[in-house]
Image (spheres, rainbow, N blue to C red):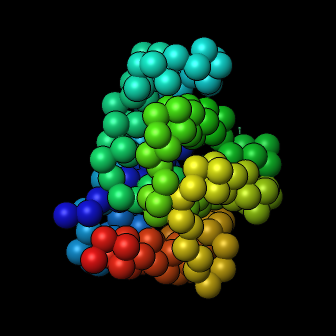
């Protein structure tokens, strides 16, 4: 069965980003695909150190637990990432993870190519579009396929648990998650 990894970049294990990932995961399962939610909340993801050793090793030279996640993404057909917005940008750990993932995949045959997915930004008020665009840069340079929705993938939320109150935001990301699943089914039919 085709699988989608949903990666939460929030330090809060039960925060808004996680809630959004869980909702998207449910939509993907309803479409008949497997969905695995992974959170970075208990990790400290280091940034790429530009050693370029991933080309020889096949994995990242930094041993902080990210390689296990990278391996799961390699085996999956889809990748959705969610980040809380911090000071107008996507949270650093999530961007560090994407940059290392992109480098490992790129230096080993470009195995992210044609995987389907996209980013979701979560914030109280400001920096959502910028963070969404920031994360999109990773998808497009990795030759991945990003389906749209009826709006951009942004959700307004502050205190944990408030994401679901942004009805339009949740409908947008549910539609997006459904499109990810549908596209994977078409590609792998
Ligand atoms: C360090 C820090 C910076 C933040 N910066 C912003 C910001 O620039 N814009 C915004 O709207 N919300 C900002 N927030 C609020 C979070 O984006 C918001 O609470 C979000 O729902 C957190 O998602 P989470 O519950 O998944 O961690 C910031 C929060 C923290 C802790």
Residue found at x 73% / y 58%: 133
Q: Position of residue 184 (x, y in %)?
A: 37, 71
Q: Note whether residue 69 is visible.
A: yes
**Which quadrant: the C terminus?**
bottom left
For this orientation, the residue located farthest to the bottom is 150
With 33 as the anchor, is 13 left or right in this view?
right
For this orientation, the residue located farthest to the left is 1
Residue found at x 44% / y 46%: 111
Q: Note whether residue 122 is visible.
A: no
Q: Position of residue 85 (x, y in %)?
A: 69, 49
For this orientation, the residue located farthest to the front is 109
Of residue 181 and residue 42, the one placed in the foreground of this image is: 181
Give the tally of numbered discs.
Answer: 0
Residue found at x 42% / y 42%: 39
Q: Does residue 177 sit above or below 78 in this rendering? A: below
With 163 as the anchor, is 14 left or right in this view?
left
Q: Does residue 36 sit above or below 39 in this rendering? A: below
Residue found at x 26% / y 68%: 33
Q: Position of residue 31 (x, y in %)?
A: 29, 78
Q: Position of residue 67 (x, y in %)?
A: 39, 28
Of residue 187 and residue 71, the one placed in the foreground of this image is: 187
Which quarter of the figure has residue 92? top right
Which quarter of the figure has residue 181? bottom left
Of residue 154 and residue 110, the one placed in the foreground of this image is: 110
């Amino acid at each position: 069965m085709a699988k989608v990894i949903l990666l939460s970049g929030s330090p809060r294990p039960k925060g808004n980003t996680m809630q959004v990932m869980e909702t998207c995961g449910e939509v993907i399962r309803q479409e008949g695909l497997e969905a695995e939610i992974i959170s970075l909340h208990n990790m400290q993801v280091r940034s790429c150190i530009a050693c370029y050793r991933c080309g020889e090793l096949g994995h990242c030279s930094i041993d902080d637990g990210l390689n296990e996640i990278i391996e799961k993404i390699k085996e999956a057909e889809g990748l959705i990432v969610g980040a809380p917005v911090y000071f107008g940008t996507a949270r650093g750990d999530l961007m560090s993870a994407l940059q290392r993932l992109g480098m490992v995949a790129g230096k080993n045959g470009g195995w992210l190519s044609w995987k389907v997915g996209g980013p979701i930004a979560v914030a109280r008020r400001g920096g959502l579009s910028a963070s969404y665009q920031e994360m999109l840069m990773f998808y497009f340079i990795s030759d991945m396929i990003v389906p749209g929705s009826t709006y951009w993938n942004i959700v307004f939320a502050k205190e944990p648990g408030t994401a679901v109150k942004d009805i339009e935001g949740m409908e947008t990301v549910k539609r997006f998650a459904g499109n990810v699943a549908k596209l994977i089914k078409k590609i792998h039919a």
